[in-house]
Image (cartoon, rainbow, N blue to C red):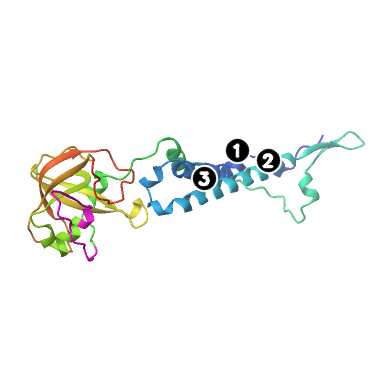
Amino acid sequence: MTGLPPTRARQPRPLGELALPLLLVLTGASLLRATVGSDMYLRYVKEGLRPYLVASGILLVLLGLAGIGAEAARRLRQPVLRRDASGRGHWHDPADDHTAGHDGHGHDHGGATRVAWLLAVPALTLLFVAPPALGSYTASRDGAAARVERTAYEELADAPTTPMALEEFIGRSVYDSMSLRGRKIRLLGFVTAGKSPDTWYLNRLKLNCCAGDARTLRVEIHGVKAPGDDTWVEVTGVWRAADVTAEHPVPIMDAGALKPVAPPRNPYEDAPPKDS
């Protein structure tokens, strides 16, 4: 009985050719887990990108399943041992009946397979150990505060306390400071340590697209003791009259009250705190 030709003698590893389609299925499944029936995707991207993520997840799963099906069909056409009239065996590959011009040289895709499995690590992480949203680590290392655009601010209602988004508070302190004088304002954000023991920062992270381009909105807080880093709080206080420039938009609030709260559903949506 004759053996396999040299190019047939080395059989591929059991999962070698399945690595890429399985990676597609895994990545698509992780996207669907983060977007369908879950708000996990809000830790990484803006809310408006959800439909695109769902569509991408479905497409990746379908492509991966198609690749798995194609590989299963190929394995069903593996070389089989045939015997001639004399009883001698020889290997026959059904693919040779339909393929012309094959050079018969095998290729080792082991390196590509190993890289593919390394790429599976982020998808597995998203499936089983979802990383938290960005917080104090990012905010404390972002040296430049995010700039705010000049806009026409509406007149504030005459109320004992005015809930306000952090970006609006910063924008008014730069471009419309008279509207803040003497008013009690309530802000929502997470905590980072300040430059001295009696000061700390209230922060929100602003996204243009995704967590990779996050910029920090921050207000310097005086008057109340800081909770631990990453604690979400509502702070009530008054704006301290001081020059706040567009190049360094970090206003100061003299706080009179502080209340720890649960993190918001969307940590990157800078909305005013809601009334309890």
Please tell me how crowded label 3 is: few (under 14), some (14-19), or many (20+) other residues with Cα within 10 Å: many
Q: Pick the quarter of the image with the C terminus.
A: top left
Which residue is located at x 60 percent, y 38 percent? 15
Q: Which residues are magenta?
A: 149-168
Which tag is nearer the camera, tag 1 or tag 3?
Answer: 3
Q: Which residue was labeled with disc 2?
A: 72
Q: Which percent across, then down, holds residue 187?
A: 19, 48
Among numbered discs 2 and 3, the one appearing first in the sequence: 3
Q: What label does residue 28 carry, if any? A: 3
Left or right of 140, for residue 1: right
Which residue is located at x 13 percent, y 60 percent? 179
Please tell me how crowded label 2 is: few (under 14), some (14-19), or many (20+) other residues with Cα within 10 Å: few
Left or right of 9, for residue 89: right
Residue type at numbered disc 3: Gly
Q: CA distance from mark 1 to mark 3?
A: 19 Å
Q: Which residue was labeled with disc 1?
A: 15
> SS of the residue at dot 2?
helix
> SS of the residue at dot 1?
loop
Q: Which percent across, then down, holds residue 138?
A: 26, 48
Residue type at numbered disc 2: Ala
Q: CA distance from mark 1 to mark 2?
A: 11 Å
Q: Which percent across, then down, holds residue 29?
A: 51, 42
Asked if residue 102 shows in the view, the reply is: yes
The answer to which quarter of the image holds residue 199 is top left
Front residue of 123/169: it is 169
Front residue of 165/11: it is 165
Q: What label does residue 160 carry, if any? A: none
Which residue is located at x 35 percent, y 52 percent? 212
The answer to which quarter of the image holds residue 152 is bottom left
Among numbered discs 1 and 2, the one appearing first in the sequence: 1
